[in-house]
Amino acid sequence: MTYQAKPLSITQVLICGAAIVTLSMGIRHGFGMWLQPITQTQNWSRETFAFALAIQNLMWGFSGIFAGMVADRFGAFRVIVGGAVLYALGLIGMAYATSTLVFSLTTGVLIGMAQAGTTYAVVYGVIGRNVSASRRSWAMGVAAAAGSFGQFLMVPTEGFLIDSLGWQTALVALSAAALMMIPLAWGLREPQLGSASGHFREQSIVQAVREAFAHRSFQLLMAGFFVCGFQVVFIAVHMPSYLKDHGLPAQVASYSLALIGLFNVFGTYAAGMLGQRMQKKYILAAIYFSRSVAISAFLWVPLTPVSVYVFSAVMGLLWLSTVPPTNAAVAHIFGLSHFSMLGGFVFFSHQIGSFLGVWLGGYLYDRLGSYDILWYSAIALGIVAALLNLPIREVAIGRTPRPLTA
């Protein structure tokens, strides 16, 4: 187990970590509001925009593995600073890209890498190392709730910025906001991790990866999180356009995303609290099944502003509430030495689902003129994910600690 002589204060970790997640997640949750302004200005298809965001989600997940490795070894501070700079550069590129290639490289690759260094895998690693196991799930719930509050706060703000400044200048303003994560990262600056500072690891990176991927529960957690990514990113990116296509006013989409963020504050916090009292697999199964029920009801009832707001509130309670129990289960089963990296692998699965959800949404819409197949797929996958989580065994792996040099 990694040893740290003087942990950071819980208050400091939660305030700084929550603020970083609020900015990072809050900015990205509003990207769907740029779909129509950018595609109409550039005369691009929805698939072009969706593909760039699909790359973003895939790059976020892939880069998160390596961001987690660096954070596990050297701490989160450097990773977050680098991520903040990439975020600002990516948003500038998103604003001024005139070719689809540049748009994909900036909006997709740069912002995806930035999100890997400024969101859950890295911040949760700091929480895991500085918060006791008895409060860890709760603390992760607080950080996830902060990301949800960021959505509630930032989505209407982004809508206001687009209306008042224009979509390009609005992205420039967001790039300046992203740089605010740099001073906040100082609050998560830990003593250097690794053998040089007296820390001990039970395994090398290769040993930890082999053990995790051979573990059935790790495989099931990854499969469930794949579905989570498919569902939430499809809805976040395509629901604003889905509502406009059905004749609802633009502000309904803005309010719906804000409601998802608001109610997710309560949902993620509740999931974190419940994770201290009951097995995480039952929490996860209930969340995935409830999502399928909510989507089914949304498609069944007449589409009105009221039905949209009710659906958004219900989905908000279920939105990122998978994050605390999933990460807490990984920490409990495999320990903390390589937690950020293993969390990065699980999140990579989430982002593969995100890639498919957002890209297929644009691809199928351009060809069929409808999102129906994606909605029905989200329902079916939610049921599958609920069933996959039930066999998970939340039992910590016992090992004999030994010092490693790498």
Image: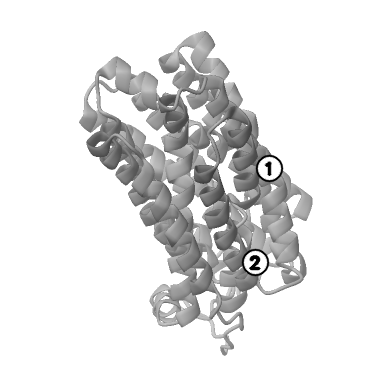
Q: Tell me the distance, in whole angstroms, between the alpha carbons under discs 1 and 2.
A: 17 Å
**Amino acid type at mark 1:** Phe
- Left or right of 12? Residue 221 is left
Check disc 2 and report the residue beneath it.
Answer: 283
Tell me where residue 373 appears, x and y as whole percent: 34, 48
Mark 1 lies on residue: 263
Q: Is residue 218 above or below residue 14?
A: below
Label 2: element kind:
helix
Position of residue 213 in the picture relative to residue 250 (left or right): left
- Kindly identify the amino acid type of the residue bearing the numbered disc 2: Ile
Q: Identify the residue at horizontal 40%, vertical 61% (top origin).
A: 349
Q: Is residue 65 above or below residue 145?
A: below
Give x and y (percent) for residue 213: 40, 77
Determine crowd level at label 1: few under 14, some 14-19, many 20+ residues with C-alpha closer than 10 A: many
- Left or right: where does residue 139 sit relative to residue 25? right
In the picture, the quarter occupied by the C terminus is bottom left
- Quadrant where the N terminus sits is bottom right
Residue at figure coordinates x 54%, y 16% from the top left: 161
Above or below: residue 122 compared with residue 242: below
Nearer to us in this view, 143 or 12: 143
Residue sitting nearer the eye, 329 or 123: 329
Give the vertical position of 81 relative to 348 (above or below): above
